[in-house]
Image: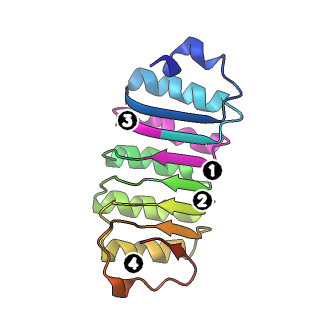
Amino acid sequence: DVLLQENFISCCDHVEDIEIYGSVISATHDVNLKKLLLSLKYLKRFDLNCTITSSSFLSIIHHTNLQELYITHLNLNENIIDFLTEGIRYSKLKTLDLSYNDFNDSSFKLLCDSLTATNIEFLFLCCCHVTTERFSHLINILDKSKSTHLDLFLNKIKNEAITIKKFNSYS
């Protein structure tokens, strides 16, 4: 909670890596996270493994210098995915890890469709309940993107569906 307090934000402008574990991101934290992310010019890596009740801070990612974003072990609802996809479009992100999240079909499609307007090279979707059908949609989208590495470890994709030419796949 100290990280998300107003007085802490102004004293850490050279931070390159932030990890938030076990907290709850509420509306108050959401506002402070926006300020924090926008003020840290050297921030390259953001690792979020906590409960999110307010997620609009994700929409400003494209205004940051973030290169790696890890949002794992959460229940990403459509509201969070909306903010996330808005934030990753035209961002500087090279790595996106959404492993150990459960997506519904519309959230997964929304995420996939946003990938064509990103610079993401490394995409991690381990244990995200990616089915053969979702995999096919994802591959069609990634063919139009800059992604070169795809990690689908612990998903239920039939072996015959995995015929990838462009990607180094770890499934």
- For disc 1, the marked residue is 91
Say whether disc 2 or disc 3 marks the residue closer to the N-terminus: 3
The image shows residue 100, relative to residue 12, as above or below, that is below
Label 3 near label 2: C-beta < 8 Å? no
How many angstroms separate mark 4 from mark 1 (CA)? 25 Å
**Boundaries of the magenta span:** 48-71
Q: Residues within 10 Å of mark 1 (few under 14, many from 20)?
A: many
Determine whether label 1 and label 2 are within 8 Å by CB: yes
Mark seen at residue 142:
none
Would residue 68 be counted in the magenta stretch?
A: yes
Where does the image place residue 29, in percent across and percent down from the top left? 44, 23
Q: Secondary structure at mark 3?
A: strand
Q: Amino acid at mark 4?
A: Ser
What residue is disc 4 on?
Answer: 136
Residue at (45% x, 36% y) in the render: 56
Q: Which residue is mark 2?
A: 118
Q: Position of residue 168 (x, y in %)?
A: 55, 74
Residue at screen point 54% across, 29% down: 34
Q: Where 165 falls versus 124 (above or below)?
A: below
Q: Mark 1 or 2 closer to N-term?
A: 1
Whether pointer 4 and pointer 1 mark residues with C-beta atoms closer than 8 Å, the reply is no
- Labelled disc at residue 50: 3
* Residue 59 relative to residue 12: left or right: left
